Image (spheres, rainbow, N blue to C red):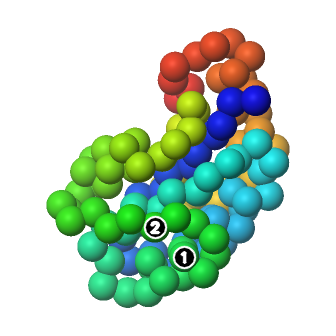
Amino acid sequence: MSSVSVVIPARNEEKHIAKVIELVKKCSLIDEIVVINNNSSDRTAEIATEAGAKVYLCKKVGKGNAMSLGLKKAKGKYIVFLDSDDMINSKQLNYIVNYAKKNNLDIVE
């Protein structure tokens, strides 16, 4: 079975990050959740850690820099990027992952 990582760049998302992580954790195909704390000044990193995600600090401001760091830190063969306020359900996430695996795709938009 191929491993799947979900990367979530986050900046000052303490209101949403726990819910997004909990939704991702409901997907049985996900092996790892990586939150890239993009210089948040709130409790985003603490909340994400408490929710069970691996959290890394991105010292360069910007979503692109956070996504690049997420690619470096994620261990999965497949990487799913989510925004920190995406309310995705496990059926949607399972579909995306299974579609990529079945069709041997590098990218699914």
Task: Tell me if mark 1 has few (under 14), some (14-19) or many (20+) residues whose alpha carbon lies within 10 angstroms of its own.
Answer: some
Q: Which residue is mark 1?
A: 49
The reply, left or right, for residue 8 in relation to residue 88 is left
The reply, left or right, for residue 34 in relation to residue 62 is right
Q: Is residue 66 above or below residue 96?
A: below
The reply, left or right, for residue 30 in relation to residue 91 is left
Q: Which residue is mark 2?
A: 55
Q: Is residue 98 above or below residue 46?
A: above
Q: Quadrant of residue 23?
A: bottom right
How many numbered circles are shown? 2
Q: Position of residue 12 (x, y in %)?
A: 38, 77
Outermost residue toward the left?
Answer: 60
Q: Is residue 67 visible?
A: no
Q: Nearer the viewer, residue 27 or 55?
A: 55
Q: CB atoms at circles 2 and 1 under 8 Å apart?
A: yes
- Label 1 amino acid? Thr
Element on which disc 1 rests: helix
Q: Earlier in the sequence, mark 2 or mark 1?
A: 1
Q: Quadrant of residue 100?
A: top right
Outermost residue toward the bottom?
Answer: 42
Element on which disc 2 rests: strand
- Residue sitting at x 69%, y 21%: 101
- Residue sitting at x 60%, y 81%: 50
